[in-house]
Image: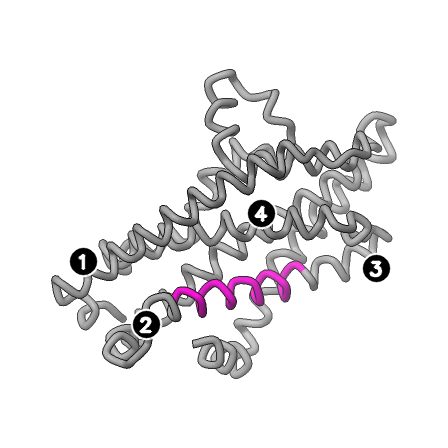
Amino acid sequence: MLLRYLYILRSSWPRTLELLYWPTLQMLIWGFMSQFLSQNSSYVARAFGVLLAAVMLWDVMFRGQLGVSLTLIEELYSRNLANLFVSPLRLHEFIAGQLVMSVLRALIGVGGACVFAFLLFHYSIFSFGFPLIAFFTMLIVFGWAIGLAVSALILRWGLGAEELAWAAMFLVAPVSGVYYPIGVLPPWLQGVANALPSAHVFEGMRALLLDGMFRWDHFAWAAGLNVVYLALGVLVFRWAIAYAREHGMLMQMGE
């Protein structure tokens, strides 16, 4: 499965360009805005690196989710899903292929943004050291969980639900505290935010950049919640595949 997706990616330059385009565009917009704010406010100057880091880490999660969802959508558009599931391919192998491809998509997309961030703003997210690995892992695993759930909805409701692949992640953005602390949210929304791994990651990122400390408590909460959400994502996806097989939907989906 991994080789198949790599061949598809290699043979289509628009796909590779799309991976680089959005992360780089967001980095440029927020980078220039951060640069402006840093020159006009002594307080906001501390947030220069916070905004750039938030943009790039947010895209890790977004690319992780899209990497899972879009691989399934590509199979549906090519009417190849039924062919895959009449082969000896096992479901866990199919899922593993999706997850590995999402990591590669995230590395390509965010890697390009990191290069431009260094060239234009002399900012390197790699200065995080070990916490960067922790943040990357927690965010991409949460992206996997959402991607699997979205894939299950597409399998259940067909390509009419394709828009969920692009919209789902933005449902959690307001309560993830990407660009602001979750403390600014209403109390009832703070409870929702604390139930999301992404909120703990971005709170930990701000603590690292502004206070110089790695919050192990946020890391532990993010890791524990990710185990739960990823397990739920896999279970929902397995249910959706079983439902589609039972109702003969694998042959009916496509353009």
Measure how far apart labels 4 and 2 are at the Cα level. 26 Å
> Mark 1 or mark 3, which is nearer the start of the sequence?
3
Residue at 29% from the left image edge and 80% from the top image edge? 88
SS class of the residue under badge 3? helix
Determine contact: label 3, label 1, CB under 8 Å. Answer: no
Which SS class for mark 4?
Answer: helix
The answer to which of 162 and 172 lies nearer the viewer is: 172
Of the two numbered discs 3 and 4 on the same chain, state the one appearing first in sequence. 3
Label 4, on which residue?
138
Q: Name the residue under label 3.
A: 119
Question: Residue shown at 26%/74% (left/top)?
Answer: 85
| Snapshot quadrant of residue 23 | bottom right
What residue lies at 74% left-to-right and 50% top-to-bottom? 130
Q: Mark 2 points at which residue?
A: 90
Establish if 8 lies above or below 202.
below
Residue 61 location, x and y as percent? Answer: 55, 50
The CA distance from mark 3 to mark 1 is: 50 Å
What amino acid does circle 3 point to? Leu
What are the residue bounds of the magenta stretch?
Answer: 95-110
Q: Quick one: SS at disc 1?
A: helix
- Is disc 1 surrounded by few (<14), some (14 to 19) or many (20+) residues within 10 Å? some
